[in-house]
Amino acid sequence: MSLEVVILAAGQGTRMKSGLPKVLHAVAGRPMLQHVVDSAQALSPLACHVVVGHGGDKVREQLEQPGVQWVEQTEQLGTGHAVLQALPDLADDSIVLVLYGDVPLITSATLQTMVAAASKGPALLTAMMADSGGYGRVVRDDTGAFVAVVEDKDASPEQKLIKEINSGVLAAPAAQLREWLPAVGNNNSQGEYYLPDILSLAVSQGITVATCQATSELEILGVNDRVQLNQVEREYQQRQAQALMLSGVTLADAGRIDVRGTLSCGSDVFIDANAVFIGDVSLGSNVQIGANCVLINTSVDDGSEILPFSHLEQASVGKHCAVGPYARLRPAAVLAEGAKIGNFVEVKKSTIGKGSKVNHLTYIGDCEMGVGVNVGAGTITCNYDGANKYVTTIGDGAFVGSNSTLVAPLTIAENGFVGAGSAITREVGSDQLAVSRAKQRNIDGWKRPSKD
Ligand code: UD1
Ligand code: CA
């Protein structure tokens, strides 16, 4: 039987106290709604119908993708009303799985169980909550059979003691939803059309409601405020940290790593505390990442070490390189094998050849550097004249003395040598020494100024 997914995401999320629609708040760098869509897509449904209302345009803009269809709920009259808006778009013979856009940790495995349980009639995902306050409670009869979901605001004092709650995830054949949803009323304390009320209709018709239990409280944790957003974030990060460790990565502190994207690692990688990985990051074998490093869409090849407090974005680090501490590799920084980038060095759109060293306090931008080059402390490639950018080419084996400014466009040929403190504006030939600085004068018998 085919599957249709309906994701409810029309609520305002007042408690987030935010200009951003709630479902766009990020968990591990991606909108929480995206997590729900991804878990749903893993089940290959006919479509994901996302019900939007508050901030709907913004949500659409960010989540537009194949397989997602948008449903408008102009007035938020309740979860039952929200699903009703999607009904006309659902295939007749399908099973419909209803998810919430603000419950991002739900796993595909649990959803699969739910869909299987709903082949003949409705199924509800429930959970035991130590503190069930605020949730809809699951009421059962003496035999343990499902009777109804009673919302917190409608529950009697005895019902409030019930620990089993409605997670919000529900599945049912489309035909049954078409029959029951229009019959749901709004005669309750909130004047809303409650989706779980279809289950009471089922029971009244003698139809059994299947229930499945979530694997943990956390899987069905809903985000209503930023405290819960953080709980979800930490849980998600913890899951990723566990997966990394089980795949053979050593973490200095599993509670102090953040992966906002995908991190792939070779064998025997070590990651020190407070490292942040954003986008697609890949680390080869025997790579060491120092404390407080940020790596964004970057690859680091086997045996390289990124020392503490370094920031790498769209960079490519070859084998056996050393970067940092306090280094900054900007987009299109490419380091060949054995290159060394030291402290307070910034590299942008440049290739650093095999074994070349840029060890201290330097800016290298728009530069093609050969093999075995040594760049002294405080060197600046002057790549920008206020209007255009120019390239500096440095040949194999060249040596650039400290505190030099290399005014591009410029070539320093193989084995060219630049004396310290030079401002170089013309090509330096191979095996030439270029010195461009005021000549030193020594004045004899110099008397120091004295106080009047
Ligand atoms: C709902 C359930 C409750 C369950 C809890 C689990 C109902 C009536 N109650 O309560 O039993 O324990 O979730 O977290 O279903 N939404 C719309 N349109 C609407 C109303 C809501 O799209 O008109 C969306 C919201 O954006 C949200 C989801 O539905 O993603 C849940 O709505 P919310 O108001 O948070 O329901 P709860 O009161 O938490
Ligand atoms: Ca909620």
Image: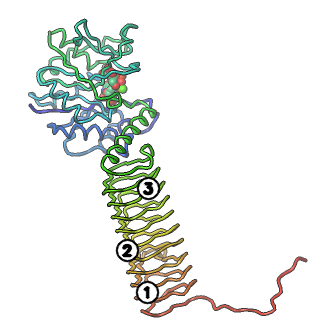
Q: Which residue is mark 2?
A: 351
**Residue 312: where, in percent of width, then height?**
42, 61
Q: Which residue is mark 1?
A: 412
Instruction: Give the residue type that dot 3 points to.
Output: Val
In the drawing, does residue 64 fall left or right of residue 431?
Answer: left
In the drawing, does residue 138 fall left or right of residue 158?
Answer: left
Ligand 2 sits in which quadrant?
A: top left
**Residue 102: where, in percent of width, then height?**
34, 33
Q: Which residue is mark 3?
A: 294
Q: Secondary structure at mark 2?
A: strand
Residue 93: image quadrant is top left
User: Does the CB distance between marks 3 and 2 fall below 8 Å?
Assistant: no
Q: Report the residue at 30% width, 21% height from top.
A: 166
**Residue 178: where, in percent of width, then height?**
15, 21
Quadrant holding the N terminus? top left
Q: Is residue 8 above or below residue 358?
A: above
Q: Nearer the viewer, residue 243 or 115?
A: 243
Instruction: Give the residue type that dot 1 points to.
Output: Ile
Q: Secondary structure at mark 3?
A: strand
Residue extending farthest top: 142
